[in-house]
Image (cartoon, helix red, strand yellow):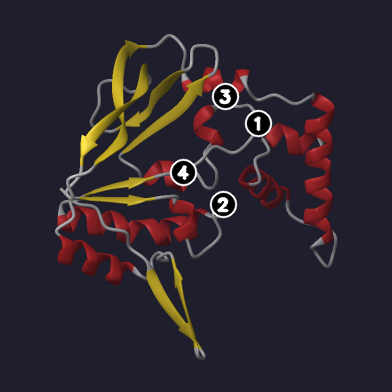
């Protein structure tokens, strides 16, 4: 098997630069790359870097992801979209940065975290359209192994050592390790709110818009309401 990296070159005036593909604008280039390489898995890391619209706007996210879903179905490939948690405590699936549209459009959502108490990795099946394990958590370790490369050398890669079911979920870890004092969290939320409103000429905004922007920045709805 082989792996390829997909980048897009953009020319503005006389300058040419390399950038990540943008969805849905560069979907035809992604299709071309998959067909030319015969790739069976497309990994987008992170998926948020490819979205041309506003991450917390449902319509923008759906407009970007729907064509990618159709491409996966048409070419019979798997698409792995990598995202990161926003900071703070709360429901784990709600801490995925950006709009709920990301989770809604995915067939499966797998949450990962490292348990600092045991040094084990934990995976929680947050959503699994084809899995009977939805809601369950499992533990594993990563250990380094040497494998041969095509040029006759060796390289170290991480191998998964599966440890079975876990009583600790990713949500447990996120809330345990949220850290920070209540005062720090409140002050940070207040600073975000002030900055958000100062960017508005009328110094006001709809509560829903503020909350959605705050979630993208890593604050919970309660954080911003208290602020």
Comparing 151 with 89, the one in front is 151
Residue 25 seen = no
List the residue tagged with mark 1.
88
Residue 187: where, in percent of width, then height?
Answer: 84, 37
Residue 86 vs 39, above or below: the answer is above
- Determine the residue positioned at 49% across, 60% down: 60
List the residue tagged with mark 3.
174
- Per the rendering, the mark at residue 83 is 4
Whether residues under marks 2 and 1 lie with C-beta atoms below 8 angstroms apart, the answer is: no
- Give the distance between the C-alpha atoms of the residues marked 3 and 2, in whole angstroms: 21 Å
- What is the crowding at mark 3: few (fewer than 14 residues within 10 Å), some, or many (at least 20)? many
Of the image marks 4 and 3, the number of the one nearer the N terminus: 4
- What is the crowding at mark 2: few (fewer than 14 residues within 10 Å), some, or many (at least 20)? many
Q: Quadrant of the C terminus?
A: top right
- Is residue 211 left or right of 193 when viewed as pictured? left
List the residue tagged with mark 2.
56
- Per the rendering, the mark at residue 187 is none
- Give the distance between the C-alpha atoms of the residues marked 1 and 4, in whole angstroms: 16 Å
Secondary structure beneath dot 2 equals loop
Residue 19 vs 190, above or below: the answer is below
Residue 165: where, in percent of width, then height?
Answer: 34, 11
Of the image marks 3 and 2, the number of the one nearer the N terminus: 2
- Is residue 65 left or right of 221 when viewed as pictured? left
- Give the distance between the C-alpha atoms of the residues marked 2 and 4, in whole angstroms: 14 Å
């Amino acid at each position: 098997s082989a792996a390829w990296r997909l980048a897009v070159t953009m020319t503005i005036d006389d300058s040419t630069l390399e950038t990540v593909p943008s969805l849905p604008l560069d979907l035809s280039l992604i299709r071309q790359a998959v067909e030319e390489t015969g790739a069976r898995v497309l990994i987008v890391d992170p998926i948020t870097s490819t979205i041309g619209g506003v991450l917390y706007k449902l319509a923008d996210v759906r407009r970007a992801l729907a064509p990618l879903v159709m491409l996966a179905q048409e070419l019979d490939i798997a698409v792995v979209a990598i995202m990161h948690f926003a900071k703070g405590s709360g429901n784990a699936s709600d801490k995925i940065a950006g709009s709920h549209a990301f989770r809604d459009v995915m067939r499966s959502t797998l949450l990962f975290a490292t348990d600092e108490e045991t040094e084990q990795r934990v995976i929680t099946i947050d959503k699994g359209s084809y899995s009977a394990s939805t809601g369950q958590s499992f533990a594993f370790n990563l250990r380094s192994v040497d494998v041969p490369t095509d040029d006759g050398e060796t390289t170290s890669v991480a191998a998964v050592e599966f440890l079975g079911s876990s009583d600790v979920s990713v949500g447990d870890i996120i809330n345990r390790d949220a850290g920070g004092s209540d005062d720090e969290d409140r002050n940070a939320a207040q600073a975000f709110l002030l900055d958000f409103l100062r960017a508005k000429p009328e110094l006001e905004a709809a509560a829903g818009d503020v909350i959605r922007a705050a979630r993208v920045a890593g604050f919970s709805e309660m954080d911003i309401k208290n602020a």
